[in-house]
Image (cartoon, rainbow, N blue to C red):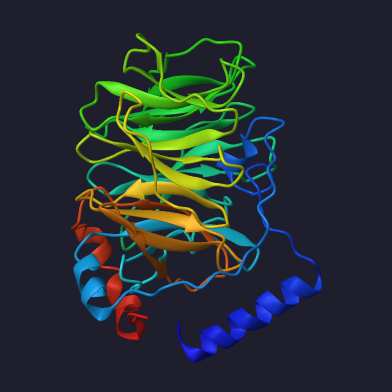
Amino acid sequence: MSNKHLLIFNLIVIAGLLVGCAGASPTSTPTPNAAEAPEGENEEAEATFEPVSTMTVEKATELSELGWIAFTSSQGGRRDVYLIRPDGSDEINLTGELPNTFAEAPVWSPEGTIIAFDGVPNSDVLRDIYLVNVSVNPEQFQITTLPGFDCYPSFSPDGQQIVYMSERDGNRDLFIMDLEGTDTVQLTDEPSYDYEPSWSPDGEHILFVSRRSGESEIYVMDADGSNVRRLTESPKLDWRPVWSPDGEWIVFESWRTGNGDIYLMRPNGSDLQQLTTSGAEDGNPTFSPDGRYIVFHSQRTGAYQLFIMAVDDPENQWLLDTGSVRSLLPVWSPVTEIADIEKLIPAVGESSSVN
């Protein structure tokens, strides 16, 4: 972080302390994921100001070869999808020139040419799914239009379908649709909420979060909605599950200790490992394309920022400095080379640097 950025950040921190600003919790974070947090699970995450590490030049060089990270940032009354390289260079506002849909929770298509996201154009009572093409001239398309919530998209491995949550029948269940928002197939039909689906790399299974046991737990089912199995059992919130690229691991956010942390487990729920132990909220993890790193957001600087850690040595964690004091919901691209993004680089490339 430059001296100028550090000074600005310190002023923001001091101002926050003077007004008694409290950190966000799963139910107070203004994101679609947070808006879906079950009632009663409202742990308070006090804003903490912990020392953070920045990556070395050698690590930055290594990470720069691992594709891109999409995330949500709120600036100037807008909420947009941004892109940034894992070394902190070439930050791009992908949706900044498009009509403001208050874009949240981006996810990549398997080939990295499309990003799906939740749009909140009117109010928190209505959410729809949008697509934006990753191009020098990006366009966005709204593919759901029903009243209520349609959100949490996840692409099939062939990129032809999306699994998502819909309130179309007055309850929150999981559906599959094509990229035009048609040919819908209902997967779950439970009186409790089912949400946050994640399609497995081999296309055979779908992770999701459900309150059918009374608490929000992580489940897995076959891609046709059959053979549902429960993977976690905790009195607190388990959510935001995502597969590793090889399908051998699941990373997720849990509040089982009273604080948001990142955990890892096998697809059958075994070999549970806690990866973060910060006093601040750590959440929304996703893997790098090679499965060696995880990007996540954290409040440990006093504001939401992005961090990267090594899976085989999770104590190695680095701040991914963005141009915003509120960056969250990161997701790593599934591929390392995305040609259409490269066309955007001349607009920002010369001014980019590794912090």
Residue closest to the eye, 113 or 293: 293
Depth check: give the residue in front, 224 or 99. 224
Q: How many labels does the image show?
A: 0
Q: Where is residue 306 in the image (x, y as percent from the top left)?
A: 45, 62
Give the quadrant of the C terminus. Answer: bottom left
Residue at point 69%, 47% (across, down): 28
Q: Is residue 202 left or right of residue 181?
A: left
Say whether residue 138 is visible. Answer: no
Left or right, 282 with respect to 53, comes to right
Percent position of residue 181, x then y = 42, 28
Q: Residue furthest bottom?
A: 3
Q: Where is residue 219 in the image (x, y as percent from the top left)?
A: 43, 22
Residue at 31% over, 58% down: 135
51 is higher (above) or lower (below) than 332: below
Quadrant of the rendered structure where residue 293 is?
A: bottom left
Q: Which residue is drawn at 24% across and 66% down?
A: 63
Q: In this view, does 348 lie to the left or right of 93?
A: left
- The x, y position of residue 278, in whole percent, is 52, 57
Return the residue nearer the eye: 337 or 293: 293
Is residue 227 in sight in this rendering? Answer: yes
Q: In which quarter of the image is residue 182?
A: top left
| Image quadrant occupied by the N terminus | bottom left
- Give the residue displayed 38% in from the left and 34% down from the top: 154
